[in-house]
Image (cartoon, rainbow, N blue to C red):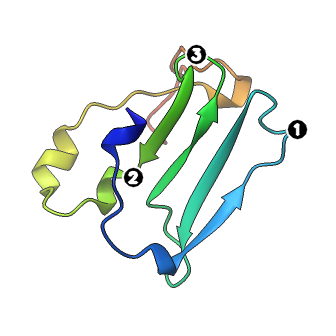
Amino acid sequence: MQGDFKLLQGEAALSDYQATPSEWPKGDIHHYFCKHCGIRPFSKGYLDIEPFNGSFHAINIATLDGVTDLELSNAPIQYEEGRANCWDVAPQITNFL
């Protein structure tokens, strides 16, 4: 839930990229990047499409403190066929992702 996310520090080091309305006609998304190294730690926004149906945060789990390499390697991966806008199915080939 949107209210469950709280940025504890580093807000001044972030820049905000917003997709144009033509790219996301049913919502509003902010992609945050570190001004120093370029990593995208999270995005937030609103999308009026499944599975979002409202406000959300998308977090790059590799940027979280206290997560071990083993935990990251065991995390489930959900592939989505974004190239064809089929967000509810995985691409046929995923070994390069």
- Which of the two discs, 3 and 1, labels the residue nearer the N terminus? 1
User: Which residue is at 33% across, 54% downward?
Assistant: 6
User: Which residue is at 60% across, 55% downward?
Assistant: 31
Q: Is residue 91 rendered to the left or right of residue 49? A: left
Identify which amino acid the numbered label 1 is placed on: Ser
Outermost residue, bottom direction? 36
| 7 lies above or below 29 | below
The residue beneath circle 1 is 22
Could you classify mark 3 by the number of other residues whose Cα lies within 10 Å: few (under 14), some (14-19), or many (20 or more)? few
On residue 60, which mark appears?
2
- Quadrant of the rendered image containing residue 87: top right
The residue beneath circle 3 is 50
Identify which amino acid the numbered label 2 is placed on: Asn
Q: Which one is in front, 94 or 55?
A: 55
Of helix, strand and loop, which one carries label 1? loop
| 29 lies above or below 79 | below
Of helix, strand and loop, which one carries label 2? loop
- Quadrant of the rendered image containing residue 82: top right
Q: Position of residue 15 (x, y in %)?
A: 61, 72
- Which of the two discs, 2 and 1, labels the residue nearer the N terminus? 1
Q: Which one is in front, 85 or 45?
A: 45
Of helix, strand and loop, which one carries label 3? loop
User: Which residue is at 55% across, 68% downward?
Assistant: 33
Outermost residue, right direction? 22
User: Which residue is at 44% across, 60% downward?
Assistant: 41
